[in-house]
Amino acid sequence: MGKRKKSSSSTSTTTSGDMGGGGGGMGMACYVYPDTPATPGRVTPDVSYDRSVYMNGSMTMDDGTTVAIWGFTDTAAGQMGGMDASGDFPSPPMRVNVGTIVHTNLSVPMMNGIHTIHHHGIEPADHADGVGHITWDVNGTYTYQWRPMSPGTYFYHCHTNTVLHAEMGMYGALIVDPPEGPGTLLSGGPIYDSEAFWVVDEIDSRWHTLGWTAGTCGQDVGLHLLEPDYFIITGVDGSGTSAMNLPPISGEMKVGEKLLARYVCAGYHPHEVRIPAGLNAKIYISDGRALPTPQSTTGFRAISGERYDMIIEPSEAGNYIVEFDIKDWITGEVWGTVKTNVVVTEP
Amino acid sequence: MKRRNFLKYTTASLATVLSGTTGLIAWSPRAQAQTINKTFYVTQGTSTMIDGSSVYFRGFSSSPSVVNVPGELITDENGDAIQQGDTVNITIHNTLNTSHRFTIDGLNVNENIPAGQTVSFSFKASNYGSFHYYDSSNAPYNRLVGLHGAIPVMPDGSTDELYPGSPTFVQQYSWIFNDIDPVWHNEIRNGRTPTTPYLPRYFTLNGLGGRPPGAPGAHDPNIDALTDPRSALHGHIGDRTLVRIVNMGKADQSVHAHANHMEWLTENGQVRDEVWEKDCLYLEANMGAIDSIYPFDVPPDSWPRVSTGAYPMHLHTEMSQTAAGGYYMFGAMTDIYFE
C-alpha cells in the first residue's frame, strides 16, 4: 500500500446493513471499505487459521441476564459462521511460534456485515493489519499473512466500527511462543509449568442491543458513553465466584512450580490489578516485548490494549485471590471488580 | 473584553476555531542562547463539529481574529524549538471580559491576565523537556475549553536527544489530545460553573478529529487529523521520531500505535528508569504527559518484509474514536506513513 486512500467516492462505501436477526441489526453502514483482494506477496504458510464470524452468540451472566455476543468461529474445527451462528467467547485462540509464517483466512458470510481481523500488537504489512480506512474491510474472504517475531501475549479483534465490534466480543487470544514452544516464556528466559489467562473486559449491555453499522452514518447511538454493568474475565462473569477455581482462568499449581499469567486489558476503561504478595509475581513481558529488567509486582494499573505476562512462583501453599477493578476513565470510580484465584498446594 | 466586542464576536463572526501550528517541530541547534518574543491573544469562538453542532472554545491565539486550539507552539522567530537557556518574552492581550492565567509547570511561569488587559512578562527556559502552557485559573474549565499549547525545549548542546543521554531521534512532533463536553463549554461561555457530569462527545488530536476517506473534509489537513501534517507521522525507515504527548482532557487514554512499538521515555515529566517498548501507552487525564520515540523500523512481523505502508495511531480507549455518539473514526486518531 503505502498511501492512504485518496478518492472518496471510489473507496468509501455506504452499504445496506443487511443483517437480519442475531443482533446484527439493520441500517446503513458508512465509511466502510469492502474489498477482498488477493494477498500481496502470498506464500505457503507454516500455520493457517480459518475464521468466520458469528453474530448470534450470547453470554449468560450470573444474574441470569443474557447478553448478545458476536465473535469469530474456527471453521477448520467445524464451527460455521453466519447470521444464526453462535460460537466461543472469547473467540478461538491462535497460538504460533516465533518465525512461523501465518495465514489468517477470514471469511465473512453474506448477510453478516463487514469485518476485519487486526492482530493487536503484531506489526505486519499494512495489507495484513486489518484496518479498513487504510486498506479494506472484508466482505468475502481475505487472507492476512504475517510472521510474528516477538514472543508474548497478544489478541486479535475486529477493526471495523471497532468501538462497537470489539465491545460486542469480536476478539480472541493470540499467543506467540518462542521457538522452544509452550512452556518457555522467552528463549533463555523462564520456563513455566502451567498458564492462566486473565482477559478482563467490561460489558455495557445497552451497547449489546446495537446493530453492526450503529453510529457509522452519524446516528447518535451513545458510543461515547460506556456504562458497564457486567465485568468478565476470559468470557466468564467475574464479579462473583464463577471465575474462581476455573482453570485456565484461575491457576492451579504446587509450591515449586511456575505459573505464567497472561493478562489482557480487553475493555475500554482502565484497570487496577491487585496480586497478592505471596504469589511472588514478576512481569517479564509487556505488549509482546521483554522488559529490560523483570519487575516484581503486587499490582499495577493498565489501559485498554495493554498486556502483561507474569511468572508466578509462590513459596507457600494457599488460596490467593487476584482482583481487577474496572475504573471509570474520567472519574476513576470503580464500576466493578473481577476476581479469580490461584490455588497453591504443597508439592 | 468590553461588552461591545463580545457582541461583535457572538453576533457577527464568532471567530473560526483553528488549530495552532503545533505539531511537527523544527529545530536548529544554536551555540548561543536567544531571546524569543511571542504574542498571544486570548480569544473566543465556535467550531462546527462533524454533526453540525456549534461548540464554544477559547484559545491563546496568534491574532485577535482567530481562535487557536491548541495555541501555537512557542518557538523562536525561525520556527525552531526553544533551546535550554533561551529567554522568552511573552505578551498576551486578553480580548475577553474574563480574567485568564498563563501557566507553564516546570518553568516557573504563572501570570494573571486581567480581563481586557495586556500583560508582558519574561522567563528563562531553564530546563529542557516537553512543557505545556495552559490557563490554570478556573481549573479545569479554562484548560478544557481550549486555552493550552506546547513549548518544547531542547537541551543545551544536544541536537538529537530529549534529555542528555536519551535515545536519539531525527524528527519530533507534538500531540495534544483533548476531549470535549459541549455542555460544559457552553456553561463556561455563559460564565457559569458546569454542574452536569462530564460527558465528552468529541475527541481531538491537535484540535482535530479524524475524517476517514469519503467523509467531508477527508484529506484536508486543516480539518482531518488523519492527514494533518502536524499530527500524521511521516518517515522513512530509520527516521526515529520523538512524539511529545499531553492529554489536556479529563479522560484517561490509551495511545496505540500500529506497525512499530513505541519507546517509552518519560511519564509526566519524569524520565523512566528503563525504556520499555509498548504498543499501548497509559496517558493520564488532566495533563498527563508522555514522551516516546516511534522508531520507524521495518514492521517486524511483516512477511515479506516491507519498508513502506500506512498505518493508524489511535486511542484504544475506543469511546474516543467517536464523535457525537457515533461517527467511528471521527475521533482522536491520525495516520503513520512509512515512505
Image (cartoon, rainbow, N blue to C red):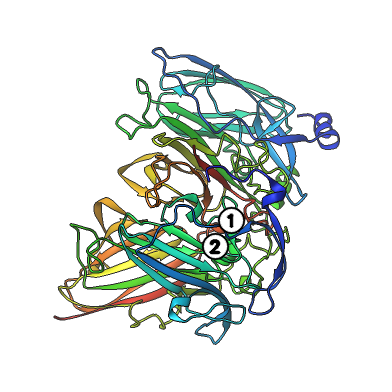
Front residue of this view, candidates B123 and B303? B303
Query: Residue B117: x, y in percent?
Result: 69, 24
Identify residue type, mark 2.
Thr
Q: Are marks 1 and 2 on the same chain?
A: yes
Name the residue tied to disc 1: A136
Q: Is A316 situated above or below B303? A: below
Q: Residues within 10 Å of mark 2 (few under 14, many from 20)?
A: many
Q: Is residue A186 above or below residue B266?
A: below
* Mark toward the start of the polypeptide (1 vs 2): 2
Residue at 60% across, 37% down: B228
Badge 2 marks a residue whose secondary structure is loop
Residue B263 visible to an observer of this rendering: yes
Q: How many marks?
A: 2
Q: Which image quadrant: the C terminus of chain A? A: bottom left
On what subunit does the disc labeled 1 rest? A
Residue B305: x percent and y percent? Answer: 39, 47
In the rendered image, the vertical position of residue B293 relative to residue B108, given as above or below: below
The residue positioned 43% from the left and 14% from the top of the image is B33
From this viewpoint, which residue is outermost toward the right? Answer: B11
Q: Amino acid at mark 1?
A: Trp
Indicate the position of residue B20 as horizontal and vertical percent values: 62, 32
Rounded to the nearest angstrom, the CA distance separating label 1 from label 2 is: 8 Å
Which numbered circle lies on residue B42? none
**Spot occupied by residue A147 in the image (x, y as percentages of width and height):** 37, 56
Dot 1 surroundings within 10 Å: few (below 14), some, or many (20 or more)?
A: many
Do the numbered discs 1 and 2 sit on residues whose CB atoms are within 8 Å?
yes
Q: Which residue is mark 2?
A: A116
